[in-house]
Amino acid sequence: MTPAGAEAALWAAFVRNRNVDMDTAGDGAVAVAGGYGLCLAGTDIDLALGAGTTRPLRGDDLDVLRAFYGARGLPLRVELDDAVLARDRAVLNAAGLHEESDRRIVLERGLDDLNADTHAISTTHDLAAWSALAASSIDGRSADPERELRTLRAAGAAAQRLVLAQVDGIPIGAGAVAVVGDVALLYGGHVQPAFRGRGLYRALVAVRFDFARGNGATRASIAVPPNSEAERAARALGFVAVTERVRLRAS
């Protein structure tokens, strides 16, 4: 399974299995060509992920997605691996889809031991506190902090384990992991700027590797903004880039 397919499957399962209330009644997922059109209201998960990973995209695939998002008052948006974009560009252009500026680089690594000191890492079930800490540790100010926080909270809720890094009993870093097939999807992994350079990011990754190995994963995947501190930190631990994802929107 590709990382994009694993991430799409994770979100689809989360949307379908969680409790529904007035705020989430419009949420949903629709399967398309190895991926899913996804909608989690008020978050960045309002686009199709993994589409085109099992076969080339067709015009009717995009018609399904357009209807799915149109019913929710949203534009058709997709996030595609660069190889899928190159292969299916003609179909995407014909459907009126154009590239946005947002990109993510996907990095992978095997799950061999990182030999990290993990004594400062603990598991937590406090989703609200985990989300707030992760949001406060991200480099750069978000144009929509509330949306960013809701997205992080959704990622934490979809994950199978949440972890915290602490210094003198004070939480200063957060990470999450979910295993889909043989892929461990890493989320978060953010450390407060004042506490970086102490090996805490490495420890957050190592603990999640331990969890992933115990749950059948053979490799870890992380998707981050290109040329970001998150990318540099991951590469320093031996992660290598496998693809870049591009977001497109219907005009």
Image: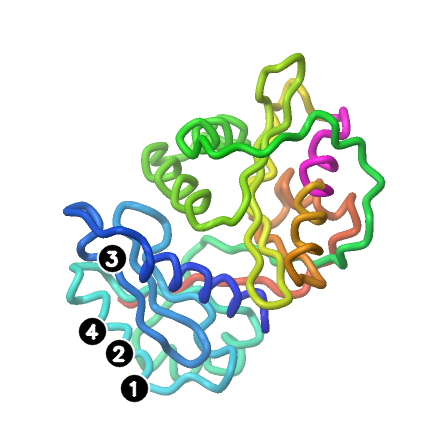
The answer for how far apart the CA atoms under marks 2 and 3 are is 16 Å
Relative height, residue 228 to residue 60 (above, below) = above
Q: Position of residue 106 (x, y in %)?
A: 61, 58
Circle 3 is placed at which residue position? Answer: 27
Question: Residue 249, position in %: x, y?
Answer: 33, 64
Does the magenta run of residues contain 202?
A: yes
Q: Crowdedness of circle 1 by 10 Å Cα count: few (<14), some, many (20+)?
A: few
Could you tell me which residue is drawn at 18 percent across and 66 percent down? 70
State the extent of the magenta-drawn residues as a range: 197-206
Image position of 10 with respect to 226: above or below: below
Mark earlier in primary sequence (4, 3): 3
Name the image quarter holding the N terminus.
Answer: bottom right
Q: Check the image and report above or below for 221 versus 88.
A: above
Please name the amino acid that badge 4 sits on: Ala
The Cα atoms of the two marked residues, 2 and 1, are separated by 6 Å
Q: Tell me which corner region of the image, top left, top right, bottom left or bottom right, holds residue 118.
A: top right
Gap between marks 2 and 4 measured at Cα: 5 Å
CA–CA distance in space, label 3 to label 1: 22 Å
Numbered tag placed on residue 67 in the rendering:
4
Q: CA distance from mark 4 to mark 3?
A: 14 Å
- Check residue 60 in the rendering and tell me which mark sits there, or answer none: 1
Residues under numbered marks 2 and 4 in contact, where contact means CB atoms less than 8 Å apart:
yes
Residue drawn at 53 percent across, 32 percent down: 124
Question: Helix, strand or loop at disc 4?
Answer: helix
Please tell me which residue is depicted at 64% across the width and 66% down the height of the picture. Answer: 182
Q: Earlier in the sequence, mark 4 or mark 1?
A: 1
Q: Which mark is residue 64?
A: 2
- 178 displayed left or right of 111: left
Which image quadrant: the C terminus?
bottom left
Looking at marks 3 and 1 on the same chain, the residue that comes earlier in the sequence is marked by 3
